[in-house]
Amino acid sequence: MTRNVKRFLAVSLLSLAPSVAAAEQFDFGGLDLFRGEYVTPVKTETFELKARHAEGGQSFLANPLHTFAVGNWTGLNTFFGGTLYGVGLPIPPPNPLAPTAKPSISGVFQVEVAPASSVTQTYYYTTNAADPTGAAKTCLWQFVVTYDPATATCSAVINQAAYGTQGVICYLDTTQSWINPSTCDGQVVSAAE
C-alpha cells in the first residue's frame, strides 16, 4: 500500500482537464440539499475512465480498492463531504485538506469495496462546509463503477461538478484516472482551484 501511495503522490497533474459546462445535471445526493435559489446552474462533465489491467495477478475475488488523490489549489483549507460505500476505509479522506501548490497532490484516501458489485462513490471538497453551493469553492466528483455479471468485468465513469459562487475550476487527470476491468480496482486523480 505504501508503494501505491508514493506512486500517487508522485504523479504529475499537468495533464488535468478542466471542467466545462454540459447540459445534463447529475444526482449528487445530499449536496443538492444545500442549493440556494441564487446559485447559478451547476457546471458538469462526464468522463469515461480508461481501462488499465493489473500489475501482478490480483484475484478477481479480492476486495477491489478505489484510490482517490486530490489536489487543493484554492489557497484555503477545504473540507470533505459525500457518501462513500464499501467494506473498509484503509485510508480515510483527509479533513481538512490543506492547500498545496499546483500541480501537487494534497491528500489521498482509499475505499475497499465488495467484489463483483456496482458502486457509486460521491465526494466533494469545499472551502465552506456550512454552505458548499453558496459562498464557497466546491468541486464534486462521482465515481460510478458498473459491474457486468455477463462478462465479469467493470467499467467506470466520473461525473464532475463545480458549485459555489466564488469561482472554482475543477480538474480530473484523465491520464492517471482508470478502472481495472478484471478486478474492478480504480483510481481517480482530481483537483480544485
Image (tube, rainbow, N blue to C red):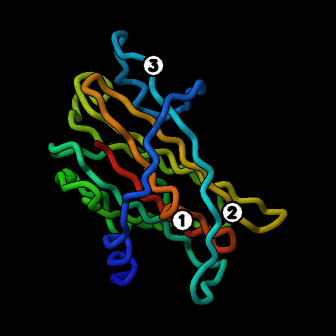
Name, please, the residue furthest toward the bottom. 56
x and y, in percent, of residue 138 in the image: 32, 35
Relative height, residue 135 to residue 67 (above, below): above
Q: Earlier in the sequence, mark 2 or mark 3?
A: 3
Disc 2 and disc 1 in contact, CB within 8 angstroms: yes
Name, please, the residue furthest toward the right. 150
Give the structural element (helix, strand or loop) at label 3: loop
Tell which tag, 2 or 3, sits nearer the viewer.
3
Relative height, residue 87 to residue 99 (above, below): below
Disc 3 and disc 1 in contact, CB within 8 angstroms: no
Q: Earlier in the sequence, mark 2 or mark 1?
A: 2
Nearer to the camera, 28 or 104: 104
Relative height, residue 51 to residue 103 (above, below): below
Q: CA distance from mark 2 to mark 1?
A: 10 Å
Amino acid identity at mark 1: Gly
Disc 2 and disc 3 in contact, CB within 8 angstroms: no
Q: Which mark is residue 41?
A: 3
Relative height, residue 24 to residue 38 (above, below): below
x and y, in percent, of residue 174 in the image: 51, 56
Amino acid identity at mark 2: Cys
Residue appearing at x 68%, y 62% in the figure: 154
Amino acid identity at mark 3: Pro
Residue wearing tag 2 = 154
Q: CA distance from mark 2 to mark 3?
A: 32 Å
Q: Earlier in the sequence, mark 3 or mark 1?
A: 3
